Image (tube, helix red, strand yellow):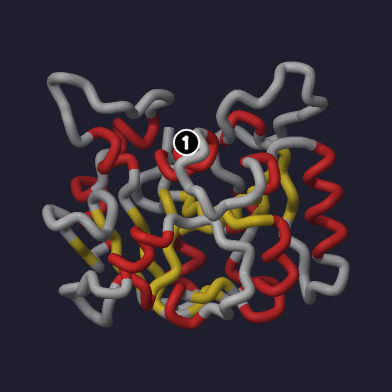
Amino acid sequence: MIDAADPWLLHFTHLDNLAEIARTGLLADNLRRADVHECGQPSIKERRRSRVVPVPPGGVVADYAPFYFAPRSPMLRSILGGKVRQYDSDQTHLVYLVTRLSRVAGAGLPWVATDRNAVLRPTRFTTDAAALAEHIDWEIMNARYWGNTPEDGSRRERRMAELLVHGNVPWRTFSHLAVCCNERAGEAAERLEAAPTTPRVLVRPDWYFDVPSGCPCQGVWSWGGGESDDR
């Protein structure tokens, strides 16, 4: 189960972006260079440049680096289904950057949480950590399947709730990286040879969709169970 008081935060990016993120930190969209290996939907990113954040520190959603509260997100499913047309790779080349709320807060980084996809008009925003227990739908974050049902037509958008960190998330804020298999773990390590520090790299095929059963993956971390050395 996910710890609602101090949840893990996940941001996935292409392996090609790792070295630059290690050098500069994870930048908000409005601060990023144009030559990143893009994973997002252009139409959604454009909406994030105009969606106002109504709580401090304000600005627009694109002024923040976004994180999900759970893996296997609807966005990852869209990539797998070929719905993100400008993405020219596959899900196995995506790596999760992992931190948790206590590390973000401890680094003094301003953050805002949303109860669903940040661009949607019904979205509620909060900066109160104590409010997260009720603000986020933790039942759906812990669920394996999050598709909409006839009884509940907003499950998908609630699974896309976000923790938005203003400006830049320094590289030292990340405690782990997660990849789908041992081969990608080696590639991540290669890209980080010049990095000032290297977070622990974990192999988590269960954070991806339909990883082949023959893939030589070894899971080493239980989702939601927590680690005591990175609090």
Pointer 1: residues within 10 angstroms few (<14), some, or many (20+)?
A: some
Residue 67 image offset from top left, x and y in percent: 44, 57
25 or 196, nearer to the observer: 25
Residue 174 image offset from top left, x and y in percent: 61, 63
* Quadrant location, the C terminus: bottom right
* Quadrant location, the N terminus: top left
Name the kind of residue labelled 1 in the image. Arg
Q: Is there any visible trace of residue 145 in the rendered image? A: yes
Residue, x 57% and y 52% (percent of image)? 87
140 or 156, nearer to the observer: 156
Q: Which residue has dot 1 on it?
A: 77
Residue 46 appears in which quarter of the rendering?
A: bottom left
130 or 16, nearer to the observer: 16
Query: Does 214 sit above or below residue 19?
Result: above
Query: Does 25 sit above or below residue 72?
Result: below
Residue, x 39% and y 24% (percent of image)? 145
Residue, x 70% and y 74% (percent of image)? 20
* Left or right side of 224 for 194: right
Residue, x 38% and y 27% (percent of image)? 143
Q: Is there any visible trace of residue 224 in the rendered image? A: no
Residue 152 image offset from top left, x and y in percent: 16, 27
* Left or right side of 204 for 99: left
